[in-house]
Image (cartoon, rainbow, N blue to C red):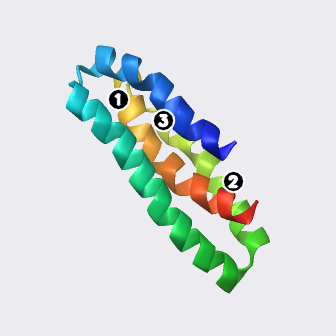
Amino acid sequence: MIVLDATIVNVALPSIREDLGFSQTSLAWVVNAYLLTFGGFLLLAGRLGVLFGHRKLFLTGIARRHSREQLLRPLPQAAQPARGESPEAIGSPITADAE
């Protein structure tokens, strides 16, 4: 499920380019920003899992991932792909570490 998130980002790139007018370089940064955030928080999640327990961290990660949907509701449709990936990139590694 976690690997699927990176795939979804790649699948969404043509729509992001078309709807938001991103250049090819900007599209590369969308993917890089997601993967760098994911990797950094995966390291942090590993340490937090050891300190606080993997079960508690898993539940926190699930709550964080689902909060993304609540954050996106008030945004206009065009701004959702760009702003919506940050909570996803934070919640996914927390969940991945505990699985």
User: Crowdedness of circle 3 by 10 Å Cα count: few (<14), some, many (20+)?
Assistant: some
**Mark 2 — residue?**
62
- Cα separation between marks 1 and 3: 9 Å
Q: Amino acid at mark 3?
A: Leu
Tag shown at residue 72: 3
> What percent of the width, then of the height, locates residue 93?
59, 58
Residue drawn where x is 30% and y is 31% of the image: 27
Residue drawn where x is 42% and y is 56% of the image: 37
> What percent of the width, then of the height, locates residue 22?
24, 25
**Mark 1 — residue?**
79
Residue 34 seen = yes
Question: On the image, which quarter does residue 13 sit in?
Answer: top left
Q: Earlier in the sequence, mark 2 or mark 1?
A: 2
Q: How many marks?
A: 3
Note whether 92 is above or below 60 in the view shown: above
Q: Earlier in the sequence, mark 3 or mark 2?
A: 2
